[in-house]
Structures are given as C-alpha cells and as structure tokens.
C-alpha cells in the first residue's frame, strides 16, 4: 500500500513538473522560446521593464520572464508592443494556475510587410468593428491595415473638396450595411488607435475602375457623362475617364486630401478590374492615346497610373497598384510604384514576375489562399473552386515564398465583402484560417508540422473567444452538411 501511495505521489510531482516546464503556445511562433528554472506569479508580470537594444531587428524583441517580473529588450516601439501581446497570450494560458514558467523568448518578423485588408467599400463597417480587427491584427503581429475605402457600391471616405462623394456615393448601395461613410474624425480616431497597436493604416482609393459610386456623384468624370447603374455584384464599363483633364485634376485633388489625412508612406490606388470598353469608344481617351503615342487602352491605364504615382512621389509617398497594371508592358511606371500581386487563379504569378522584371517591389496576397472571404464550402457566388481551408493555406499558399526575390517586401491577407458579407459573418471567415497567414508572415520557424500547428491553434481558441472572436470550421472535413456561412 505504501509503495502504491509513493508511486502516486511521484507521478503527481512528475506531472506537475512536466506541466510547469512545458513550453507555452505562442502564435505566430517565435524564433526561440526557452523554459527556464522557476516561475513568475501572475501578479508580478506588471513589474515590466523596457530596455533599448539597437542590435535587435526592427519590430523584434527579447522577452525574459523571471521570478520577480518581466524584462523586454527591443529597438523600437513595435517590438515592445508585440512583446506585450505575447505576454498577454501567456498570461491567459496560465491564469488558472496563477503563474507563468520563467521563459526566455527571442522573436522578430520574417518579412517587413504584413497586412490585413478590410473591404469597407462594398459593405460599411462601424468604427467599433474596424477597431475589433485592428486588435486582432496587433495580437497576431500584422503591421499594416489596408483599408479598401471605395467601391462601385459605396464611396466611404469623406473628401471635403467633393462632398457629393459621400452625400451621394456613400448611399448608392441598397442593403442595410451599405449605408455610411467615415468622417475625417473617424479616420483620425482609427489611425491613432492603430498606431497605439503598432499598425499603420494604408488607405485604398480604387481607380480608375470600381467607380460607379463616385460617378453617381459626379457623372461628368466618366467618359460619356452618364449616371451608371450600380450592380449588386461585379463591375461595369463605367470607370473614370483618363482622357479628360478635369478627371485627372479631380483625382489628384482627392489624393491630396487622402495624403493630408493619412500619414502612411504608402497609398493604395487600386487599378484592378478596369474594363476598357468605354475608353475604346471615348474620343477624349482615344485623343490622349494618340497625343502620347500610346499603344492602346491598357497603355493608357499605365500612363494614368504613372501620373498618379508621380503625384504621390512629389509628396514623398509610394503608390501601390493591383497586379493588373503589369500584365502587359507599356508606358513605364515610376520607381515609387509597388505591385500588389493578387490574381493567382486567373494569371498565376504573371504579375509577380513582370513586377520584378520592371524593378518594382511586390506584396504577395494571392486570392488562393489569402482571400479569406472565400469560404470553406460553397456559398452564394463562391463555388467549390473558390473554397479552401487552413491546411490549404499552410501547405500550399502561393504567396508564401521563402527565399524569393529581394523585391518581395511582404504578404497580405484580405477580407472582401462581396455577396453581402456583413459584420456578423466576418469572424467565422477569418478564424481560424488567419492564424496560418499570420504564421507565414511573421514566423521564421520552419519545422512545425501542420498537425502540430493546428493543434496549437485549437489550444488558443479559448483565448480569442474570450476576446469575442467567433470561430468557424478550420478544415473542410469539419464543415457540417447544413452549415451556414450567414
């Protein structure tokens, strides 16, 4: 009996020690996490000391949890913020036992551009909702909020020079969550909120296409002065006219106000899905093509894009364009141009290759597998070939290029809101798949199997649920036959 009792005592002590020294779960995975001797009571983690260390890479940190408190070494504010996010994740995991094992963590990002895009053009989200996903980004160590603010279904950014953009353009959509815009005060509030969480807000004004809302407000800026119908999905031939001087001046004035509002070095100017049917028939556009000796309407879009990028360059800014602008060669883009490669499904890596050939930096954010509006099972306009799960991202994401060209500056994740993806539908599209994208953007660790990674994601689910994020299925095999994405 005594031997049995001693055996049980030994096993209890052994199990407790194993638990105490087991490495915690941190996502994205840090470069190094070493369990040290001892434990730090949770009451002591408020004893936080920050030290400057210029040798630590930008956004990186060294975190040491000791018996009497926590020390953080970093070279910038971002590293300090990310260290505290890691500490927050740890504190939750060990809340029930009241202490954190003493740890030494070394961490820094794999790539410098780690963005999450929210489409507020097709569907308007409340300021509180935008903040909710900025919080998510900071926890997962994204550093740029790409804010898609204009669409055919709505112009969401107040431009005081042109008030009809919001008085008319913000209300062309017919659904309940397609009404509204962001005032200058809203924008400043969001920029400040993001900055406090190590995130830069990068606005997108999509030109020349996806312009139906703007052309409802100012029809004369199109080729034929028509008020376009606003389609529930997709886009029309009604785009900004590249041949009219007043249209060029209008857009440069808009860019001026955008730059006054947003301190970001980068301004996204769209450029995707701009059909040229009207340009091909427009005397102003054809006159511009002839005047400049351009080849065709695509070459005209390159000139148009270059004009806008040069305008930004004069302000010390860089212009981002979707990859459509470099599908074919033509009028040269200036050296402050960045290409956002997205259409893997339609053009594979054509935009990436052509951008690098032209000497332009690239952000990789391919629709397969970075567009998190694509569900795991067919829904509305998303057929089976536009579905993917967390394992597809982890194993097969074309954007996750290791050892790629030095012009590849980073990656993006996107949440488009076509087919009426409203606020209540967002969480289950992001969670848990966004963990795989965060891991690929941040972590320099390559030796974690998918099975281990997905197990870690599941272990962190309660932490994110406590922060009011709702999880959907992660694998296609986990989707019930009657599951609703609404």
Image (cartoon, grey):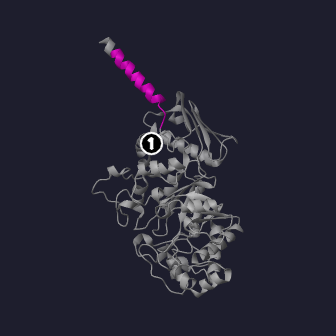
Q: What x and y, as percent, mark residue 12?
A: 38, 23
Question: Where is the N terminus found, in terms of image quarters?
Answer: top left
- For residue 380, what is the image quadrant? bottom left
Q: Is residue 28 above or below residue 399?
A: above
Foreground pick, 127 / 442: 442
Question: Where is the C terminus found, in terms of image quarters?
Answer: bottom left
Q: Is the magenta stretch mostly helix, strand or loop?
A: helix
Quick one: label 1, few (<14), some, or many (20+) residues within 10 Å? many
Residue on which disc 1 sits: 453
Q: Does the magenta stretch include residue 51?
A: no
In the image, the segment drawn in magenta is 5-24
Q: Helix, strand or loop at disc 1?
A: helix
For residue 49, side relative to residue 277 (left or right): right
Foreground pick, 165 / 33: 33
Q: What x and y, as percent, mark residue 375?
A: 39, 58
For residue 202, side relative to residue 89 (left or right): right
Residue drawn at the location 55% of the way across and 52% of the way down: 142
Q: In this view, does 202 lie above or below 197?
A: below
Foreground pick, 95 / 323: 323
């Amino acid at each position: 009996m005594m031997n049995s009792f001693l055996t049980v005592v030994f096993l209890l002590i052994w199990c407790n020690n194993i638990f105490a020294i087991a490495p915690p779960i941190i996502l994205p995975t840090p470069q190094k996490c070493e369990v040290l001797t001892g434990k730090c009571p949770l009451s002591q983690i408020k004893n936080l000391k920050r030290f400057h260390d210029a040798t630590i890479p930008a956004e990186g940190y060294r975190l040491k949890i000791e018996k009497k408190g926590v020390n953080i070494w970093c070279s910038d504010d971002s590293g300090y913020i990310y260290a505290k996010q890691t500490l927050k994740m740890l504190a939750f995991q060990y809340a029930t036992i009241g202490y954190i094992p003493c740890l030494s963590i070394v961490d820094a990002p794999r790539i410098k551009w780690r963005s999450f895009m929210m489409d507020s053009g097709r569907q308007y989200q409340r300021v509180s909702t935008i903040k909710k996903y900025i919080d998510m980004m900071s926890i997962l160590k994204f550093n740029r909020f790409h804010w898609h603010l204009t669409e055919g279904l709505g112009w969401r950014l107040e431009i005081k020079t042109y008030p009809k953009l919001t008085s008319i353009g913000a209300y062309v959509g017919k659904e309940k969550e397609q009404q509204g815009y962001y005032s200058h005060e809203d924008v400043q509030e969001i920029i400040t909120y993001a900055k406090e969480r190590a995130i830069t807000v990068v606005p997108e004004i999509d030109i020349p296409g996806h312009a139906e809302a703007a052309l409802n407000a100012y029809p004369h800026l199109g080729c034929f002065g028509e008020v376009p119908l606003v389609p529930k999905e997709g886009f029309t031939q009604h785009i900004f006219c590249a041949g009219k001087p007043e249209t060029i001046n209008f857009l440069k004035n808009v860019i001026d106000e955008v730059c006054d509002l947003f301190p970001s070095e980068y301004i996204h100017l769209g450029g995707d899905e701009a059909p040229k049917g009207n340009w091909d028939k427009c005397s102003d556009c054809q006159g511009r093509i002839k005047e400049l000796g351009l080849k065709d309407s695509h070459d005209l879009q390159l000139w148009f894009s270059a004009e806008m990028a040069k305008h930004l360059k004069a302000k010390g800014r860089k212009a981002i364009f979707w990859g459509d602008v470099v599908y074919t060669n033509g009028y040269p883009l200036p050296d402050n141009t960045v290409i956002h490669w997205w259409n893997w499904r339609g053009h594979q890596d054509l935009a990436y290759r052509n951008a690098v050939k032209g000497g332009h930096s690239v952000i990789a954010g391919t629709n397969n597998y970075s567009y998190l509006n694509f569900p795991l099972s067919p829904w509305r306009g998303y057929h089976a070939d536009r579905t993917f799960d967390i394992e597809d991202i982890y194993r097969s994401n074309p954007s996750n290029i290791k050892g790629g060209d030095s012009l590849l500056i980073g990656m993006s994740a996107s949440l488009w809101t076509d087919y009426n993806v409203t606020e209540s539908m967002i969480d289950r599209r992001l969670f848990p798949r966004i963990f795989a994208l965060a891991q690929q953007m941040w972590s320099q660790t390559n030796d974690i199997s998918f099975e281990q990674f997905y197990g870690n994601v599941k272990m962190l689910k309660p932490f994110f649920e406590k922060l009011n994020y709702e999880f959907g299925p992660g694998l296609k095999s986990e989707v019930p036959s009657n599951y609703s994405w609404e």
